[in-house]
Amino acid sequence: MKSDPVIERIKTRVAGVDPNGPRKVLGVFQLNIKAADGMHKWVVDLKALNVKEGTVDNPDVTLNVDDEEFFLIGTKQVPVPDAVAQGKIEIIGDQTLANALIEQLK
């Protein structure tokens, strides 16, 4: 998957968070990334501070995006608000939490 380096960077960043320190975003995010070889599903749990392949029941926010677009967003070539406005990423769930995550990705 082209966006594998983006997932690895997310894993590294989440692993580096101090669980006892202040955090700006506390939520569970389901990433559904459509790639040439099928759908890749990831859970980014910013409450428990882990990232794993798979799904979770009742995530706070679900992001549906294709592999190329996720790569472009993750490498800061396309801002998230632009991708949303162009219909390239679908955000379902807690919009306030999604916006907090987007702020952290800028």
Image (spheres, rainbow, N blue to C red):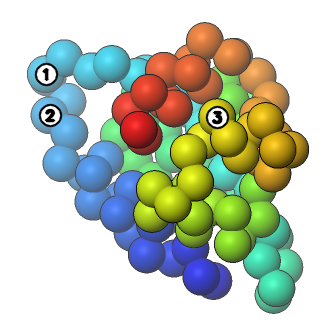
Q: Is 96 left, or right, of 26 in this rendering?
A: right
Image x and y of residue 27, in percent:
51, 25
For residue 55, side relative to residue 23 (left or right): right
> Looking at the picture, which amino acid does disc 3 mark?
Pro
Outermost residue toward the top? 96
Of residues 52 and 7, which is closer to you in this image?
7
Using the image, determine if residue 1 lies above or below residue 6.
Answer: below
Q: Position of residue 62 (x, y in %)?
A: 73, 37
The kind of secondary structure element at disc 1 is: loop
Image height check: is 30 above or below 12?
A: above
As drawn, 99 above or below 19: above
Determine the image quadrant of residue 86: top right
4 and 69: which is toward the camera: 69
Mark 2 lies on residue = 18
- Which residue is pictured at 77% across the width and 65% down the height? 66
Mark 2 near mark 1, Cβ–Cβ under 8 Å? yes
Dividing the image into 4 quarters, which one contains the N terminus?
bottom right
Q: Which residue bears the numbered disc 1?
A: 21
Residue shown at 39% from the left, 69% from the top: 8
- Counting residues from the start of the chain, the first of labels 2 and 3 encountered is 2
Write down the residue under mark 3: 81
Three-letter amino acid code at the position of disc 2: Asp
| For residue 64, side relative to residue 60 (left or right) | right
